[in-house]
Image (spheres, helix red, strand yellow):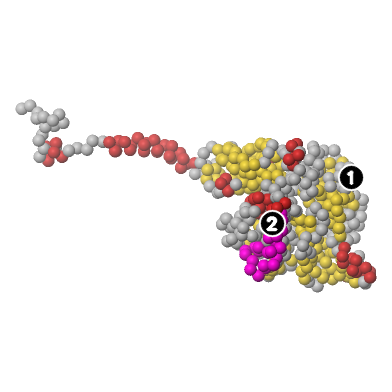
């Protein structure tokens, strides 16, 4: 780790991840989460956001090897989870979301100023003010972001591990007793809890500081997902009121729900110990599945069986891999999460669910069908969308850099172009690497440096020998057809062997 802050003890007060190292004589400020690289203000300077076990969050300016003005920001507890960035206010600048191990959640603007801040256990702290036994947070999961209610507003989703202890033993983790898990869904604009949240789940009796909480998966498991394609083009106030009305009615009709529920919005898939909790975000309807073994990591979502449906992939502590298949939920590239704690392999800094992102790109079904393309050019149809409220007033931010790669490496870029507007585009590209099967990655880079990606697979001239066979044989076949169709058929009456008149081909008898 890089020591960007003052040294401190190897075991961090309030932290949940023990670190042992000989570096700095056992002292150091540890970077426990993956850094994130963006352009906070959409300018020319690249910024790396990283939190440390000192509770400091830095915005490092890469080119100038310094720290951006207004940073670092001090949290009360160690920052052990990845920082999230997204434009949720609508001013075409990025907001930064940070949670520390003690349950403090904050929203910052690009200059490090606090937009809102809250303590997840604020109500419990007020109730426990006169009690000897109090509630404390013993770590949180990484944050997820998505449109939980289906109204176009983003929410922060995370789960916290709640413990109880004597007030005098707050700094003694070995004296903490696990009480429960709480699943929070928090409005990213205001910091308020969404309706029906937080949800409480029973926990065990023992508390292990080494056990990390899996990140919540946000995914739409409804049978009908057609309304999402309208959301990426913007909602009117009438549309929002209609969706809220649908959610209220769906909450009253829990007994007669269709597949995935009757509400709009996303589902939350949260593993807790050996139980998989699937929750409809807009109504809080929940279903629990016991997989029989501890689930230590985030659930993934993709069409892993190639059936056109969406599958959930669950891994257990003993090395088992389970897939939960659905014949009803259709696959869509914006409704997948298939790269661990990031949505897609090449989108390390795009953390919002695909349907919920303010910007994005996806390949249309006509182009992503697996097939062997015989020819020189490959047609690819993709759509760019940008639903930031203020984007129409800032033409300098309407810059969409698209590149297509035959794989993941930048050295295998086969197409690059910058667009000035959103919409559907069809480009004909050439693959210079010869025949074979390819994973084509269509990537969009915004003015803030956020990368959105969609990947699909095709074959390119794999059976090119079949094409050579047609080139050689087809002209011969065409030339042979008229010969076979228009040749003159002999008449048996003109054949002397069959009693003909013997007039020959000239039609008369030969001279004697």
Mark 2 vs mark 1, CA separation in Å: 41 Å
The residue that mark 1 highlights is: 70
Q: Which residue is mark 2?
A: 242
Side of 371 where 292 appears, left or right: right
- Is 484 rendered above or below residue 24? above
Residue 344 visible in this rendered orientation of the protein: no
Res 430 → quadrant: top right
In the image, is residue 275 above or below residue 83? below
Report x, y in % for residue 33. 80, 53
Question: In the image, what residue occupies the spot 11% across and 37% down?
Answer: 500
Which residue is rendered at x = 69% and y = 64% of the image? 249
Of residues 87 and 136, which is closer to you in this image?
Answer: 87
Q: Residues within 10 Å of mark 1 (few under 14, many from 20)?
A: few
Q: Are marks 2 and 1 in contact (CB under 8 Å)?
A: no
Residue in the image at 71% along x and 63% along y: 248
Which is the main secondary structure of the residues drawn in magenta? Answer: helix
Q: Is residue 462 visible?
A: yes
The answer to whether 462 is drawn above or below residue 313 in the figure is above
Magenta-tinted stretch: 240-262
Residue 18 placement (x, y as % from top left): 84, 60
Location of residue 173 by image quarter: bottom right
């Amino acid at each position: 780790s890089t020591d960007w802050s003052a040294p401190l003890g190897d075991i961090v007060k309030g932290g949940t991840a023990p670190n042992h190292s000989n570096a700095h004589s056992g002292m150091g400020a540890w970077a426990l989460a993956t850094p994130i690289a963006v352009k906070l203000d959409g300018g020319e300077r690249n910024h790396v956001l990283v939190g440390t076990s000192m509770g400091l969050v830095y915005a490092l300016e890469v080119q100038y090897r310094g720290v951006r003005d207004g940073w670092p920001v001090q949290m009360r507890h160690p920052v052990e989870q990845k920082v999230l960035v997204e434009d949720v206010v609508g001013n075409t600048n990025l907001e930064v979301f940070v949670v520390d191990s003690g349950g403090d959640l904050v929203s910052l603007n690009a200059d490090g100023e606090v937009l809102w801040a809250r303590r997840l256990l604020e109500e419990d702290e007020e109730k426990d003010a006169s009690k000897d036994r109090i509630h404390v947070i013993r770590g949180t999961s990484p944050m997820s972001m998505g449109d939980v209610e289906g109204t176009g507003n983003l929410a922060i989703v995370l789960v916290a591990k709640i413990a109880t202890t004597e007030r005098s033993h707050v700094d003694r983790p070995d004296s903490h007793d696990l009480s429960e898990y709480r699943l929070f869904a928090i409005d990213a604009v205001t910091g308020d809890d969404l309706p029906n949240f937080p949800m409480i789940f029973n926990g065990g009796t023992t508390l292990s500081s080494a056990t990390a909480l899996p990140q919540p998966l946000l995914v739409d498991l409804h049978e009908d997902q057609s309304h999402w394609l309208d959301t990426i083009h913007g909602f009117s106030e009438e549309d929002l009121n209609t969706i809220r009305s649908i959610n209220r009615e769906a909450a009253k009709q829990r007994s007669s729900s269709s597949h995935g529920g009757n509400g709009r919005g996303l589902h939350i898939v949260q593993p807790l110990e050996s139980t998989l909790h699937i929750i409809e975000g807009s109504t809080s309807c929940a279903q629990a599945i016991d997989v029989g073994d501890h689930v230590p990591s985030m659930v993934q979502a993709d069409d892993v069986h190639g059936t056109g449906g969406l599958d959930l992939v669950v891994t257990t502590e003993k090395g088992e891999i389970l897939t939960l298949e659905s014949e009803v939920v259709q696959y869509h590239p914006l409704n997948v999460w298939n790269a661990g704690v990031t949505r897609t392999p090449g989108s390390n800094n795009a953390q919002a669910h695909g349907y919920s992102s303010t910007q994005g790109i996806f390949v249309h079904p006509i182009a992503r069908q697996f097939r062997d393309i015989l020819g020189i050019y490959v047609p690819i149809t993709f759509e760019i969308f940008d639903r930031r409220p203020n984007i129409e007033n800032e033409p300098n931010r309407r810059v969409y850099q698209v590149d297509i790669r035959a794989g993941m490496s930048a050295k295998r870029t086969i197409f690059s172009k910058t667009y000035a507007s959103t919409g559907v585009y069809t480009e004909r590209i050439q693959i210079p690497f010869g025949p074979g099967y390819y994973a084509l990655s269509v990537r969009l880079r915004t003015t803030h440096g956020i990368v959105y990606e969609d990947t699909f697979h095709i074959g390119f001239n794999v059976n090119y020998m079949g094409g050579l066979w047609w080139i050689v044989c087809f002209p011969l076949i065409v030339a042979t057809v008229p010969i076979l169709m228009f040749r003159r058929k002999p008449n048996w009456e003109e054949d002397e062997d069959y009693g003909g008149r013997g007039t020959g081909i000239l039609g008369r008898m030969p001279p004697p």
